[in-house]
Image (spheres, rainbow, N blue to C red):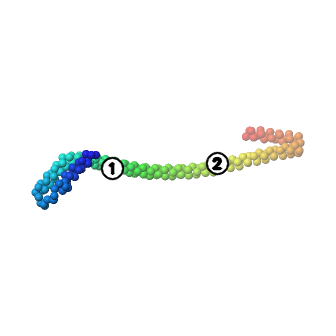
C-alpha cells in the first residue's frame, strides 16, 4: 500500500512541476525558455515512465479483457445456437406431437364409429333373435298348453267313459265292445 502512495506522490509532483517550483522560487516571467525546456523534459519523462510501466500493463489488461469478451461472446453464441437448436427441436417435436394427436383422434373417432356400428348391428341381431325366441317360445308354450288341455280332456273323457261304462254297460255290452274293437284292430292291421 505504501508503494502506491509513494508512486502517486511522485507522479503528482512530476505532473505538476509548478507546485514544486512555486515553493522554491519567486514567480518568473512568462515565456521563459528554461521553463519550456523543463516542461518538455518533464513531459517526456512522464511519457517514458507511462510507456515503460503502464503500457505493458495496459496491453495485458486490454488483451485479457478482449480474451474475456471473446470467450464470453463465443460462449453466448454457442448457448444461443444450442438454445435455437433446442427451440427448433421442441417446435418439431410439438408439430410431430400435434400430428400424432390428430392421427390418434382420427383413429379414436374411426374406432368409435366402428364400435357404435357394431353395437347397433349386435342390438338389431339380438332384438331379432329375441323376437324369434319369443315367437318360438310362444309357439312352444301354446303347443304345450294344447297338449296339456288335450291330455286333461282325454283324462277327463276316459274318467267319464269309465264311469259311464261302469254304470251303463253290462257284461254283455262290454264283451261285444271288446270283440268289435278287436275286429277293428284286425282289419286296421291288414290294411
Q: Position of residue 79 (x, y in %)?
A: 33, 48
Q: Which mark is residue 65?
A: none
Q: Which badge, 1 or 2, comes first in the chain's sequence?
A: 1
Q: Is residue 136 left or right of residue 10?
A: right
| Residue at the left extreme of this rendering | 33
Residue ID for mark 2: 133
Residue ID for mark 1: 80
Q: Nearer the viewer, residue 71 or 50?
A: 50
Q: Residue at x 67, y 48 (%)?
A: 137
Element on which disc 2 rests: helix
Q: Nearer the viewer, residue 166 or 50?
A: 50
Element on which disc 1 rests: helix
Q: Is residue 189 visible?
A: yes
Please tell me how crowded label 1 is: few (under 14), some (14-19), or many (20+) other residues with Cα within 10 Å: few
Count numbered badges in the picture: 2
Q: Position of residue 188 (x, y in %)?
A: 75, 40
Q: Residue at x 83, y 40 (%)?
A: 178
Mark 1 touches mark 2? (CB < 8 Å):
no
Q: Residue at x 78, y 41 (%)?
A: 184
Q: Residue at x 57, y 49 (%)?
A: 122
Please tell me how crowded label 2 is: few (under 14), some (14-19), or many (20+) other residues with Cα within 10 Å: few
Q: Position of residue 174 (x, y in %)?
A: 86, 41
Q: Is residue 18 visible?
A: no
Q: Quadrant of the C terminus?
A: top right
What distance separates the C-alpha of mark 1 from that of mark 2?
76 Å
**Which label lies toward us, 1 or 2?**
1
| Residue at the bottom extreme of this rendering | 30
Q: Nearer the viewer, residue 133 or 42?
A: 42
Q: Nearer the viewer, residue 83 or 173?
A: 83
Q: Is residue 14 left or right of residue 121?
A: left
Q: Position of residue 73 (x, y in %)?
A: 29, 49
Amino acid at each position: 500500500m505504501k508503494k502506491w502512495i509513494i508512486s502517486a506522490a511522485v507522479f503528482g509532483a512530476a505532473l505538476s512541476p509548478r507546485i514544486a517550483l512555486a515553493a522554491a522560487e519567486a514567480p518568473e516571467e512568462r515565456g521563459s525558455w528554461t521553463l519550456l525546456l523543463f516542461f518538455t523534459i518533464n513531459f517526456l519523462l512522464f511519457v517514458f515512465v507511462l510507456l515503460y510501466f503502464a503500457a505493458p500493463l495496459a496491453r495485458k489488461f486490454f488483451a485479457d479483457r478482449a480474451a474475456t469478451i471473446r470467450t464470453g461472446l463465443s460462449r453466448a453464441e454457442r448457448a444461443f445456437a444450442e438454445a435455437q437448436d433446442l427451440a427448433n427441436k421442441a417446435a418439431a417435436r410439438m408439430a410431430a406431437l400435434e400430428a400424432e394427436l390428430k392421427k390418434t383422434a382420427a383413429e379414436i373417432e374411426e374406432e368409435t364409429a366402428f364400435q357404435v356400428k357394431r353395437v347397433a348391428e349386435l342390438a338389431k341381431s339380438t332384438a331379432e333373435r329375441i323376437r324369434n325366441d319369443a315367437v318360438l317360445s310362444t309357439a312352444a308354450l301354446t303347443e304345450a298348453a294344447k297338449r296339456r288341455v288335450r291330455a286333461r280332456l282325454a283324462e277327463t273323457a276316459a274318467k267319464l267313459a269309465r264311469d259311464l261304462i261302469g254304470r251303463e254297460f253290462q257284461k254283455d255290452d262290454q264283451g261285444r265292445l271288446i270283440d268289435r274293437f278287436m275286429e277293428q284292430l284286425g282289419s286296421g292291421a291288414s290294411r
